[in-house]
């Protein structure tokens, strides 16, 4: 299964060029927010980033979550360079941990204020998890199967596994699979009270314990297919969830999802070694349960460019072998690793695309 196109929306902008620019520039301070009278930080997507009137002309009443997903999905299609995709069998798989929780809380607030009979049906329809996938299908004219995968830590990995099945069984010629998450005040409050907020807005991925978090939001989508095209980024060689990986070859780079969402992230020392450099790019986009998709996009870009990008934050409490400089490199295999709160591991292996 090959990555043919990538679309991304995050706090640093829109498009794969914005991601590459962020990887070159390194960490930048996120926006300040106020939570219950206390100052904190969040990696938020600016409204102008998703103000695409042509693409979103029929989505005036859609919420921010759906708009971010549609913009990222549209850019993944356009970036592939494949023509007439709306005439081909394309499936859509949207992965999200928390879905439209901001809209859901708005809907509940309206019930409390106006009663059951006075709430907006539009707000209700936007609050369901599958709304983003439906908007993608409608806005892009895709009529293939559409599914939303919801899970806290491994939703994106499950979406990739399902995409592999659809392609293998020839249910679709292509699959548009990605993740979307939104920041909200309730989420910020939960983050700051249950986890350790970064006092200066800087996630320190290699501290491991204490692990600092800064909530983020955004969307990233991948156009996937079995055939190699001119703009192909790389191949998804394997996706594993809590599986034995002893027969897998050693990677050239480990990208770890240390973003402060585990109270103790020393579990990642099980999978990193002195022989393989490690990288973590959460300081560029924030702490998200579906952050694996963003790290996977960074890995795919590195595979295409044959370049390893320096870690945006290099505090190294455990003296790990981490990437300190941006350098050209011969990369054959990248492993993207995420642990959940039960110490279960999921991994995405990215490999140079073969014909």
Image (spheres, rainbow, N blue to C red):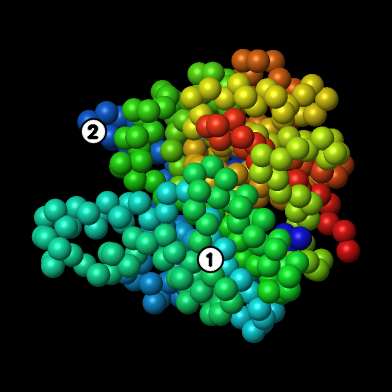
Q: Is residue 98 above or below residue 167?
A: above
Viewer-proximal residue among 12 and 273: 273
User: Can I make out residue 69 in this image?
Assistant: yes
**First reached walking from the N terminus: tag 1 or tag 2:** 2
**What residue occupies the far bottom of the structure in this picture?**
87
Q: Is residue 13 left or right of residue 189?
A: right
Residue receiving disc 1: 147
Residue at screen point 73% across, 73% down? 170
Write down the residue under mark 2.
36
* Residue in view at x 79 percent, y 21 percent: 274
Determine whether the residue tagged by mark 1 lies in a helix, strand or loop. strand
Instruction: Give residue 143's position: percent from left, percent from top.
Output: 56, 80
**11 displayed left or right of 163:** left
Q: Nearer the viewer, mark 1 or mark 2?
A: 1
Q: Residues within 10 Å of mark 2 (few under 14, many from 20)?
A: few
Image quarter of residue 73: bottom right
Residue positioned 35% across, 41% down in the render: 187
In which quadrant of the rendered view does residue 32 lie?
Answer: top left
The answer to whether residue 7 is seen in the rendering is no
Left or right for 91, reference 351: left
Q: Is 156 in front, or is 231?
A: 156
């Amino acid at each position: 299964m090959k990555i043919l196109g990538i679309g991304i929306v995050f706090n640093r902008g829109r498009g794969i060029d914005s991601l590459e620019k962020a990887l070159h520039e390194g960490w930048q301070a996120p926006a300040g927010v106020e939570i219950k009278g206390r100052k904190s930080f969040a990696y938020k997507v600016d409204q102008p980033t998703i103000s695409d009137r042509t693409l979103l002309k029929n989505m005036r009443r859609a919420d921010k979550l759906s708009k971010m997903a549609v913009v990222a999905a549209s850019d993944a299609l356009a970036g592939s360079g494949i023509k007439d995709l709306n005439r081909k069998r394309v499936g859509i798989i949207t992965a999200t941990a928390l879905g439209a929780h901001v809209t859901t809380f708005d809907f509940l607030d309206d019930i409390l204020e106006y009663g059951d009979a006075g709430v907006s049906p539009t707000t209700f329809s936007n609050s369901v998890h599958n709304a983003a996938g439906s908007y993608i299908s409608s806005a892009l004219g895709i009529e293939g199967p559409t599914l939303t995968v919801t899970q806290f830590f491994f939703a994106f990995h499950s979406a990739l596994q399902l995409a592999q099945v659809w392609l293998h069984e020839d249910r679709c010629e292509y699959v548009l699979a990605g993740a979307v998450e939104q920041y909200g005040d309730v989420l910020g409050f939960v983050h700051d009270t249950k986890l350790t907020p970064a006092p200066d807005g800087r996630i320190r991925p290699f501290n491991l314990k204490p692990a600092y978090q800064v909530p983020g939001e955004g969307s990233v989508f991948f156009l996937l297919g079995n055939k190699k095209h001119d703009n192909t980024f790389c191949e998804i060689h394997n996706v594993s969830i809590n599986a034995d990986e002893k027969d897998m070859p050693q990677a050239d780079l480990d990208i770890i999802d240390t973003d402060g969402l585990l109270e103790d992230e020393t579990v990642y020392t099980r999978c990193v070694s002195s022989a393989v450099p490690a990288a973590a790019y959460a300081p560029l986009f924030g702490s998200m349960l579906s952050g694996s998709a963003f790290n996977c996009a960074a890995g795919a870009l590195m595979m295409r460019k044959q370049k390893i990008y320096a870690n945006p934050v290099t505090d190294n409490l455990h003296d790990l072998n981490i990437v300190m400089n941006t350098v050209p490199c011969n990369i054959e295999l990248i492993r993207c690793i995420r642990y959940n709160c039960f110490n279960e591991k999921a991994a995405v292996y990215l490999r140079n695309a073969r014909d």
